Image (cartoon, grey):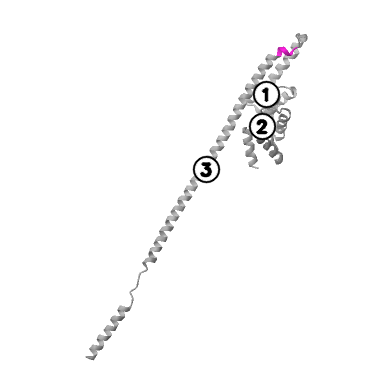
Amino acid sequence: MMKRTLAISLLGLYGAAVIATPAPVTDVTSSSSEQRITELERKFSTRTEAQHRQQEQLDVMQNEVNELRGAIEVQNYQLEKILERQRELYLEIDKRIETVKAQPSTIPASTVNTVATTVEAPLSANENEAYDKAVNLILKDRLYDQAIPEFQTFLQNFPNSSYASNAHYWLGQLLFNKQDWAGAGVQFQSLITDYPDSSKIADATLKLGITEMERANAARAKQLWEQVVAVFPDSSSAKLADKRLKGL
């Protein structure tokens, strides 16, 4: 009987011990947090990649816009030059018409004779013919190298011609295209100094600045470009000069 009572007591104590020992608890909260962090990292990574792709697309579009702007500026400049050339041709035609009209009145009545006719008329004809020949080599025949000596000869023979300012400009432009910076600079400077009322002053000053820059005279180039911007602010030459100044 005592053995049975002792066994029952031990069994009761063992059961109490089993009941008193806490069962293991799974950390549900920790596992859920890790999943949420992982999900947030994945979303953040996806969003970052999307933003990078958008930025790349924006960069490509910006480059395309810049290229289009550059092409438009070049086309506008070329168009302005074409229109300017047309205006020059019209002005030259008008001058020649006026010259033809004025020829009879330039000869005094006392000298109207055969000798006077043979001296005066060929001189004017030679001037027009020489200038026409030089200009046509550029505009019509595209023989630029051959036009250079023609304009040089014209300026030597007719330094006081009404076409002299245009001849200096054309000659300067031809030498400029051949990168003869010194020769081009001389012609543009002559135009600026001797013909301040010429319609080509702005462009000649711009290009004179370029010739100075090409000859490592940066200070002089800067001065000339600033002059173009200040004196001819609405011209296409001023816009090009301003770009040159910003690039210094």
Quadrant assignment, res 183: top right
Q: Residue 202 has which mark?
A: 2
- Badge 1 is on which residue? 134
Name the secondary structure under disc 2.
Answer: helix
Mostly what secondary structure, the magenta segment? helix
State yes or no: residue 52 in magenta.
Answer: no
Question: Where is 237 relative to 117, above or below?
Answer: below
Q: In which quadrant is the N terminus drawn?
A: bottom left
The amino acid type, in three-letter code, at marker 1 is Ala
Question: Where is 124 relative to 190, above or below?
Answer: above
- Badge 3 is on which residue? 62
Mark closest to the chain's N terminus, 1 or 2: 1
How many numbered callouts?
Answer: 3
Residue 238 visible in the shown view:
yes
The percent coordinates of residue 66 (x first, y second) are 54, 40
Name the secondary structure under disc 3.
Answer: helix
Quadrant assignment, res 234: top right
Q: Residue furthest bottom?
A: 2
